[in-house]
Each structure stands twice: as C-alpha cells, then as structure tokens.
Amino acid sequence: MSNKIFSFDIFDTAIMRKTLNPTGIFYVMEYRLKSVVHDKFTKNLTNCMDDFAKIRIASETLVRKESNKNEITIYDIYEVIKSKYSLSNEEVNLLIKLETSFEIDMCVGVTRISNIIKKLQISDKKVVFISDMYLPQSIVLEILNTLGININENYVYVSSHENQTKHDGKLFIVVSEKHQCSLNNIVHIGDNIHSDYIIPSSLSIDSYLFTECINNRYEEQITNLILNESNNDIKVCMELLLGTSKICRVNNPKNNKISCSAYEIAVNIAAPIFVSFVEWVLQQAQKKRIQKICFLARDGQIFYEIAKKIARRRMLHFKFIYLYGSRVAWLLPALDTIDEDYIERILYAPEPENIDNLANRLGINSVTFINELQKFSSEKLELHSKINREQLDKIKKIFYTSEFQYYLLKIAEEKRELVLKYLQQCEIVEGSFCIVDLGWNGSSQYNLKKIITIAGKTCNIEGLYLGLFTNKYSSTDNRYKSYLFGPATVKSTNSLIPGMQEIYETLAAADHGLTIGYESDNGTISPIFNNSTNLALKGYDLQSFRQGIFDYLDVYLEHDNFFKIYDPEQSVQYLLQLFEAFKLDPKKEYAELCSHYYHSVDMVEHKFIPLSIALPEAKYHKIVHEYGKDKMSWYRYKEAHWPEASFLLSKCMQTN
Amino acid sequence: MRILFVVHQFFPQWYTGTERFVLNNIRQLRKMGYNIEVLTYGHLDNHPFFEQDGILVRNYYYDNFKITCIKSLNKKFSSDFDINDESSQTFFDNYLRNNKFDIIHIAHPMRLGGILYIAKSLKIPTIITLTDFWLLCPGVQGIRKNGTLCLNPDGGKNCSSYCYPTISYEKIANRYSKIKNYLEIADIVVSPSYFLANVFQEKFDIDIKVIYHGIDYSSITPTNRLYNCDKSLKIAYIGTILPHKGVHLIVQALKHFNDNLKIYIFGGIYDEIYIEKLLSDSKNEKRIFFMGGYEDSEITQIMNSVDMTICPSIWWENSPITILTSFAYQVPVIGNNIGGCQEFIKNGINGIHFNFNDPKDLASQLSFLSKNPEFVRTLKANVQFSKRVEEEAFDYEHVYQTCIHNVRGVVIVE
C-alpha cells in the first residue's frame, strides 16, 4: 500500500473554473480585451477583439485537427491567431499573458478533493496530478499552488509538457516509469469517462470517476442558451452567474440529505434568480432616484438580506426597510367603503371554513366578531362550526347592512391609525419610496397607497415585483413594475401553472410568522404575528437554504468587477428557463425536500397542504390522467401545490 | 472589488512619476470594472480641511475618482521622514472599517505609511509598490547631501553622518530597524524594475515581484521619422530640470567635442539657480536649445521631431518614465550605465550608455553618434515597445487575486 501513487486529474476534479464552462474564460477574456485602448499599436488586435472568444475557440479546434503532435500547446493556438490576424509579437504576448493570467485567477479548488489530497499528503502518500492540457506545466503548477495545493513540478504531469496524453494512456505510463511504480499500484480519479476511467482501467489502474464538476441538467440548459447568445457581455455574466452556482453546488458543505438538497436548490436555482432580481431592483431605484426601498414581509425578507449585502459591498447609499405587513394586516385598514369587491374577496375567494376563519381574514378578534355578527342573525352562530354556502350568503347580506358596515369601518379606522403610526415610524408616509415583493397582483401596494391617501398624505409608491399577473391594480399603472414577467408577458408562464407562485413563495420563505396586525407599546409600534416562526416550514431546512443563498452571494460579489456590466433585464430569458427546468423537471431530492414544506391555501394560513406529496397509486393514476387532459383539474384534489414534484415522488414510491 | 490606492501626493497639485503611475492604473482598473478610491496626503495643500478623528481631512474628486486627502496635526510627525504617524491611526481604522475595501494598494508609503499596520489588523490584503528608495533612504533618491550616491544606510549610521546630522541617531536607527518588518507585513511587494527590487531584496531579504510600469498608448503615434543624413542629429531631454537629473552633464559634454548635432531641453523651471547656471555655462553653445515647459499633449510632437532622447541623471533612475515613453514612440535613448537606465537601455541595441556622471564619456558617445548617424536607424529598429498600461493593470489584477486567495486560504483539512 505504501508504494501506491494517488493520481488526480486537475481540471474539473482537483480544481474548477469560476465560469460555468471552460470556454467561459474566453468570453471573460474578450470582455477584458475590450478595455484595451484601441490605438495604432493594437490595430491588428482590434480586428479580432470583437469576436475574440469565437476566434480563440475555433483556432484551438483547428490546431487540434491539423497538429501532428500528441498534444498541442497554447503557443500553437496563438500562432494560428497571429498569422490569421497579422498580430505583432507584442500583441500575441499580451493575449497569451492575459489567458494564462485568467486561468490562474479564474480557478477555485474543489473542497472535497482538496481535502483528500491534504490528508494523503499529511500521511506521506505520493500524490501526482495529471492533465491533458494545452497550458504550460508552469501555469498549471501555479494554479495548483495558488489554490493551496502544495506540490512541485516533479509531481505535475501535463500533456503539453510531456507530449503524451491521458487520452491514449501514455501519460499514465510516463507517471509509472518516472516514479518506478507499476500501473496497478496507481489509483486515479478524474471526471472524463474515457481518459480518466476507461483508459486507465484498461491499463489496470484503479480508477474512479468524479462527476460533481459536470454540468447538471439545469446548468446544461443555460449552457445551451449561452451558446446561442450573440452579446458577449451577457455571455460573461451568465457564465459567472451560473458558474457561481456550480462552485457552490460542488463545494456544498452540508452532510445530510435534506440540508444538502436545501443548500443545492438555493445555490442552483433560487440564488441566481433572486440575486438578479435584487440587482434589477437596485438599478430601478437608482434610475428613479429613489433612496428608500421597502421590502415587504414576508416574501421580501430574503431580498432584503441580499440587498443589504450587495449595498454594503458596493457602498451604495440606499435606505432599506423591512416592512412588516400582509394582505390581512392591510386589507381592513385600507377600507373606506365596503363594496362588492371587498365582500367577494373576504367571503368567497376561497370560501372560509368557519366564522373563526372569516374573522381572521378580516383581521378582527374572533369573539368580538361573532358577537357583533350574532346581533344581525336569528340563528345561533358557532365560531368553529363549518359554514355552508347558504349560511355564507346570509352573512353576505349582513355585510350589506349599514349598521354592520359602520361597525367594520370603525374597526378599519382604528386599525388604520396603528398602521399609519407604524409607517410613520418607518418614515414612509410621505415622499417617494419603492416597495419590493414577489408579486402577484400588487394588492399590498394598492392597499398601502390607499391607507396613506385616506390619511390625507401624499406619497409616490413604486412597486417592484419579481412577477405580476394581469389584474386590476397593476395592469395599467406604470408604478407597478415587474422583472421576470408582467401582465403583457404573463402568458409565457402558462406552462408553469399550477404551482408556480407557491414554488417561488417557498423559495422566498421567511423565518417568522404572518403579520396579522400591530400593537403599540409606549408609542413604539410593533407587528403582531400569528406565530413566532413560519408555520409552513415544518421539516424544511430554511437555515441550510439561507446559507446557500449567502454563500452564493459571497462568491458572486467576488466577481463584482464583471457584474458592473450586468443588465439583469437581459438575463430574464435565462432565469425563466432555469426556473422552468426546475419546476417541470425537478430532481427527486428536491421533490422530497419540498414535501416538508407546507404552503397555506388562504391568506390567513387557516389550512396548509404540502408543496409536494407522494400520491397513493390509484389516486396518482387518476390525477395524472385528468392532468393530461386539463392541468387545472389539479386544483380539484388539493393534495399538494406542485404537480410535477408530486408525480415524481409518487412514481418513485411505486418503483420502490 | 473595491480597491484603495494610497499615495503620498496626488493630482491635480502633484503630477510626476508615481502620481502618474497611480492615475494610469486606476483609470485602467476602472475600465476593467473595479471600484477605486484614492487616499493621499495634503502636502502643501491650502484648500480648506475639516477635523476628523484627530487629523485634517478633505474630500475631492479627480477624474471622477473619490479622493480622500488628509493632513496630520501631530507636530512631532515628520511627514517626509517618519513611516508611521500614530495620530492618524484612529482615522485609518474608522476609514477602513467604514469603506470595506477588498485590497489596499500602497503606491508610496511616505506620509501615510501607518495605514499598512491598520490594514493588517483588519486583515485587509495589502500590496506595496516600491516607486523609489524612500523606505531605505528618507532623502528618496539615494544621493547624499554632498552629491555622492548612497544606497547603504549601514543601519542608519550613514544617514546620520551624511544627511541628517540634526536628527538623533537613535531615531534614524529606529526607522531603519522597522523597514524589514514593514515590508514583511505587506502581502506582496512589487517593484517597477529589477534594479530597485534587487536593492531591497539584498538589504532586507524579502520576496519582491517585478511589474514594469506601463505606458498609456491612447495618444501615442509611432514615429516614422528616420535619421536624415543631410541634417544634424536631434536629441531631446524631456523632464524636470533639477540637479539630480543631470542636464549640466550635457552642457559639460558639449565642451568636449565639436561635431554637429542639436540638443533640445524640454522642462519647466523648478530650481532657478540651477537653470541660471546652465544658461550661463552654455551661453556660447549654439547646439543646445532650452525650450521651456511642455504639456503632455505636446509629447507626440516632440518625439516626432527628434532622433533620440537623453536621460543624463546623476542618480539611479528606478523606472524612468522618459525612457519608457521614448520606447513607446520607438525613439532610442542615451542614458547612464547604472540602475534603471542600465536595465531598460540595452547598450548598442535600443540606445547608448555612457559612464555614470562622466561628461567626457557622454561627449565621446554623442560625438560617435554625430559621426555615425545611420547607427540611430539601427537602434530605432531594435526598440521594443514599452509595456502598455493595460498590461500593467492586468498584472496588478493578477496580484490582487493572488493576494485575496492567500489571505482567505482555501483548503481546510477535516
């Protein structure tokens, strides 16, 4: 055992690039080359600068095709570019230096492998690195050393240096000869099935495949979009945006299955979407010259945290406010007349189960409410007894009586006072401010504006949403702006219904309960929650999810100099595609994790159903059959919110 | 990434080599997406300052860069001599905590050197570029008061004997004893020439990375001028006219030969006595022309009208911008055979050396060139273009990344 050599592939095994794909480096190089002044000395360089990435990739392909050598070098590649574009020696040297320098700067270690290497080295085991690579050995060595892997040149085998490759197996033989070790005493690990597994196995080398650095299904979808992208700046940003996901995914620090999945969903799906959304929010606020940005509880909590980190890093001067509120906390205070619309929303969308549920929706104490309601009813009313449609219609009639309306409006006025004091405390009853929320109708913005207007104050509220549906508040008002989709483009999300909003709301889950009102304590107004924690979380690992978001953000902000060019509006199609891939084709682990998240079916969290569920076999077949004909049939069963994840879990259960 | 550049003086009041190095690089780094601010010292700055954390502060913008300019109120602090001013520590601490820079790049530690200690305590990666000898020689240029060269402080004894007899030896020795530790605190030390790097490496046994200064080519047009045998050779001196720049060597050299050539002296007046002496010594000399000051925008015109430039300094030039600029225009240079001149000018290849501080040897080289003007064409053909400022910034970007990697560390063994 002591004579064994432990051989590690380098790229995508011991280390990985910060871009999603290896060719991403060339997009970054093209971007950087454009910062070189166009002058008479770089005249010829200018000719290939605008299309540099394409030229660089094509030149490598050409050299590989035409070379007689076992392995090409970076100098061979640039010789082709030099002669095709008549570059001077200085220009070629600049390009080679830039590429090698980028390769060093744009690599990160793969924690799991690095830790194994360290352990082997500490135990005096012989460790070698072996790579099919056109870069010089010195650069590869510098990359390894820069990333904390202490190794010298006698243990780094690079095909361009040895003129032998792993691909044909001869590089393994070089290692075996130089270290006087038989091939069957070599243990090799790498990511390429041919060069790192089939070939070494055929040489009796003990071989292992390490596939973590290979793009997963979501990363692959984005890669395909990047390939068809014509704008290099977008390519750079998407390579880094999703490259950041990949770095965090590969270096996932979690051990147990649930935490691991929560972390992975955060870094792979939620973080790129949410960080881009917050970037868009900050850009919109800057364009509108608005300094106060209110993130609405609870979906806005994660955006609030992201915005704070970005602003702190960039020294942006915004005032961020996390505004406690909810539909239930603001609906009644925003009431100055009771119209049919209000009554319909309270009584029928969806129908309340009992009077307690109805009182909660109104935001009124249940006992006070039933006592008041009893005054208008000859029947004995019970707080928790189920109410049917006929009883509901009777209650509706009570809502139309002027006495009952007077009662409701009086409570509305009292509650409005408290909300206004809270808003004053947050310094947002006058002037201009933005509110940030997930979506979907903009009713919170409408109610907030109404509360402030009824009080005789004037303010300008600009709503910034992840997505908006067609609705009466936002469809015609340009103070309601949305990022991923809006009333005009909402049709593009048709394939994601049912379940889309609930998934987004799960990804944006907060750590506290629903705001149901406010209380005054010695003049300080505080929100009242229905529960100290978020009732929906159950077994969902919010802590690991949040850690994923913040780890992502840390890596993302390291590329801040590149994200200066980031226009989040140009990444919308990528992010929609990413979400669509996740929603329609979830991984089994994600579907399982989401079965631990319970999403409310109404605005007061009266009843929860899980985001995903494993259906019993008979029910599964029935629902799938109906779902195939009409997706909206899913709503009839009220088993879970996310059909695709539920179908996957059901299928897995049957297979098991 | 937020980067703070620290420099002992800055534009618009100060605009020589180090300030230009900073401005060139921060402009390029900004283009590359970095967020840059500058901290400088208000040397002879008469603008209104306000008091903050025990020192004087003023903020201004130059070329859209935010500049924080400070002055010490500490009467015991000798800003051109002391490395650390303890009265500035509170300000540095608050300033660095509030601004959250990812990297601090000290382009010159004079007057603001203490920021390195605070940066270290806050674990902010910091690099130093050595742009002259100041850490080693408080007189900056390594020239003793008697005019002889000295890069051997001998623990401060020579400084005390030759240059600072009024300052106690203990204070000088104390300053000297802290230099090695000071440089070791920095994450990476960079020099713009191997010569300067070697001087510090030999004295303090520290690693120094060499990154040559880059030239801003945006306004440079390569000169097509080729020496015309029918006309006399034209040579330009371009720079400040101060004794250590050695313009007097040219005047003295002209007295030793009669060959036909023309020497143009471009540069503003900083030392009237010196200028008057030069004018008086050359009043009968028809081959030398004092052209007065020049603007940056006139450099192209100057370079296009001369065959060579000359750098006659009587000290070690570290990384002389004049030489690098000449090469950017493909104009060969005559320079001395020590320090930075020796490093950048390859004798007989892209320029001509003359023996340091030797007007007779300079005369013989100038005479040779006058008699063999076609040789200038050979020299010109061999000139390799100076490094671009973009390349310099790419190199510094790489240094910043390395620095961050090293400070944060990567691998943790479980």
Image (cartoon, coloured by chain):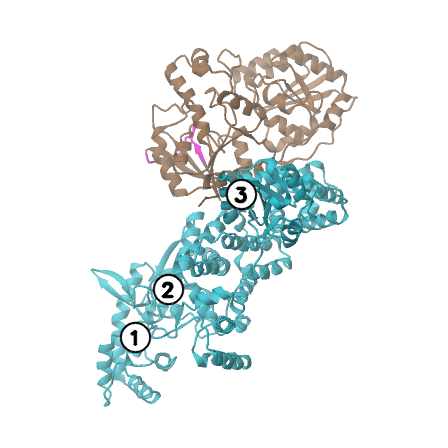
Chain colours: A cyan, B brown
Percent from the top left, x then y, of residue A150?
53, 38
Percent from the top left, x then y, of residue B388?
62, 35
Examine the structure image and report whether residue B40 is included in the region drawn in magenta. Answer: yes
* Nearer the camera: disc 1 or disc 3: 1
Marks 3 and 2: same chain? no
Q: Is residue A323 left or right of residue B362?
A: left
Crowd band around label 3 with a 10 angstrom C-alpha radius: few (<14), some (14–19), many (20+): some
1 and 3 marks in contact (CB < 8 Å) = no
- Please tell me how many numbered marks the rendered image carries: 3
Tag 2: residue type?
A: Arg
Crowd band around label 1 with a 10 angstrom C-alpha radius: few (<14), some (14–19), many (20+): many
Crowd band around label 2 with a 10 angstrom C-alpha radius: few (<14), some (14–19), many (20+): many
The label on residue A360 is 1
Residue that mark 2 sits on: A298
Examine the structure image and report whether residue B355 is included in the region drawn in magenta. Answer: no
Residue A32 figure quarter: top right
2 and 1 marks in contact (CB < 8 Å) = no
Tag 1: residue type?
A: Asn
Marks 1 and 3: same chain? no
Task: Inspect this view and state whether residue A566 appears.
Answer: no
Residue B193 figure quarter: top right
Q: Chain of mark 2?
A: A
Q: Chain of mark 1?
A: A
- Chain part drawn in magenta: B39-53
Residue B326 figure quarter: top right
Disc 1 is placed on an element classified as helix
